[in-house]
Image (cartoon, helix red, strand yellow):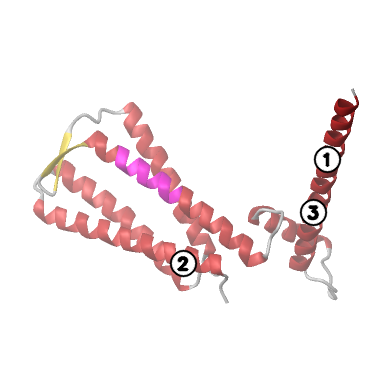
Amino acid sequence: MLTQKEKRLRTYLKVLLGIYLIILAFCIINLFKTSGLASAILSITVATLAFVNILLCWYAISDLRRFTLLVKLIIWGAVVSAIVNSSVLLWHDTSNFIFFWNISLQFKSIIIISIVFDILVAVITFILLSSAERARYGLKYFSPLQFKTLESLAEVIIYGEEETISSEEVAKNVDTYFNIFQANITSCCRCFNFSTSTFKNNITSGS
């Protein structure tokens, strides 16, 4: 049973899937409408990337918990794409124009739009994935990566034929303990601040 935040991530992936389908359709139609080599190469490149992301989204939506790695691939793909496009923008001449859907567009503008889109995809997907994984494991203190590292460490340490407690339960217990520990420290700091402010007020009123 998926948590509410996991359902939100799956809904977002469906929206992202729809966006990539639209991009793919536009690129395919443009291939039949354009006669320029540069526009055709751009359409094929974008269509290929869109098709790959469509497959990633499709399989991730089918079983979100099983194919969490595919969601991470979407993030890393967007990051790599943004880096590559940024390098093209910085070190290559992008002042030429390309006809896309019979509209003259400067190559620089297309690159900038692509960079902004990739950054948005990477950031939004990362935030939603982190939130979904925290909800899935019921994490209160550790990040999903820290939790999985702790779980792997616990699995190595308590390895044996008869395990009284699983490695995941060990990691969850440590997460709960650290959360309580942090809460106690926060409470102590608040008490200290209250005591300090009260002491200062008493001195001020006395003088």
Q: Position of residue 189 (x, y in %)?
A: 82, 42
Q: Is residue 28 visible?
A: yes
The residue depicted at 46 percent of the width and 66 percent of the height is: 10
In the image: residue 63, left or right of residue 171 = left
Q: Position of residue 67 (x, y in %)?
A: 51, 66
SS label for mark 1: helix
Identify residue for label 2. Answer: 10
Marks 2 and 3 sit apart, C-alpha to C-alpha, by 30 Å
| Magenta stretch: helix, strand or loop mostly | helix
Sequence-wise first label, 2 or 3? 2
Verify whether residue 116 appears in magenta: yes
Q: Residue furthest top?
A: 207
Disc 3 crowd rating (10 Å Cα; few below 14, some 14-19, many 20+) is some
Identify residue for label 3. Answer: 178
Marks 1 and 2 sit apart, C-alpha to C-alpha, by 45 Å
Q: Amino acid at mark 3?
A: Phe
Disc 2 crowd rating (10 Å Cα; few below 14, some 14-19, many 20+) is many
Q: Position of residue 152 (x, y in %)?
A: 73, 60
The residue depicted at 84 percent of the width and 70 percent of the height is: 160
Looking at the rendering, in which quadrant would you find the C terminus? top right
Sequence-wise first label, 1 or 3? 3
The residue range painted magenta reads 112-122
Q: Where 100 sits versus 58, above or below?
A: above
In the image: residue 58, left or right of residue 137 = left
Verify whether residue 179 appears in magenta: no
Looking at the rendering, in which quadrant would you find the N terminus? bottom right
Q: Where 187 sits versus 64, above or below?
A: above
In the image: residue 30, left or right of residue 46 = left
Question: In front here: 121 or 194?
Answer: 194
The residue depicted at 84 percent of the width and 31 percent of the height is: 201
SS label for mark 2: helix
Identify residue for label 1. Answer: 194
